[in-house]
Image: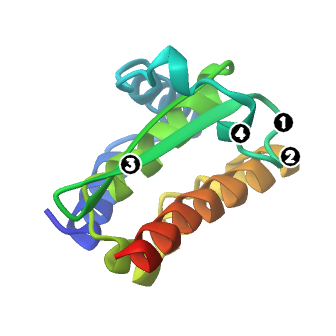
Amino acid sequence: MDIREIQEEIIDEFSMFDDWEERYQYVIDLGNSLPLINEEFKTEENIIKGCQSKVWLHGEQKDGNVVFTADSDAILTKGIIAILIRVFSNQKPADILEADTAFIDEIGLKEHLSPTRANGLVSMIKQIKMYALAFQAKN
């Protein structure tokens, strides 16, 4: 699936919930299903700056695509990074760089986060795009 198709799928999933309590629970559930980052990548250099809680993000290139793994010490933040990894992992660097992130506004996520969590979300996206840029430059 391409990035836009995955984003549409997430928008559809979030539209099934009536209120934000249910959506928060869904985000937390997504975080619990996140494939965990290897302990060796839980380093200071993989911590996303600008997040209130600790979020580790690791990217590597496999068969021309960027594959991300992540973890967080906060359950909601773990769910947020899980959504982003679902969208951007296993995609080509150019596609990640060109991708629109309007789906975040469409599901209403940013408006229901505290200002510090919303800043963290922006930092997560920025770090994902930095990995893509680095891999694209390397190719």
Q: Quadrant of the C terminus?
A: bottom left
Per the image, the residue denoted by label 4 is 45
**Marks 1 and 4, how far apart in space?**
16 Å
Residue mark closest to the camera, 1 vs 4? 4
Q: Disc 4 residue type? A: Glu
Considering only order in the chain, which callout, 2 or 4, is on the residue closer to the N terminus? 4
Per the image, the residue denoted by label 2 is 116
Q: Disc 2 residue type? A: Thr
**Marks 4 and 3, how far apart in space?**
14 Å
Q: Disc 1 residue type? A: Gln
Residue mark closest to the camera, 2 vs 1? 1
x 77%, y 44%: residue: 117
x 62%, y 58%: residue: 127
| Residue at the front extreme of this rendering | 138
Q: Is residue 50 visible?
A: yes
Q: Residue 53 location, x and y as percent?
A: 78, 29
The quadrant in which residue 61 appears is bottom left
Q: Residue 73 location, x and y as percent?
A: 67, 18
Q: Secondary structure at mark 4?
A: helix
**Marks 4 and 2, how far apart in space?**
21 Å
Per the image, the residue denoted by label 3 is 60
The quadrant in which residue 6 appears is bottom left
**Marks 3 and 2, how far apart in space?**
28 Å
Per the image, the residue denoted by label 1 is 52
Q: Disc 3 residue type? A: Glu
With 44 as the anchor, is 9 left or right in this view? left
Q: Is residue 19 visible?
A: no
Q: Secondary structure at mark 1?
A: loop
Indicate whether 84 appears above or below 7.
above
Q: Secondary structure at mark 2?
A: helix
Look at the image and name its color scheme: rainbow
Q: Residue 45 location, x and y as percent?
A: 71, 39
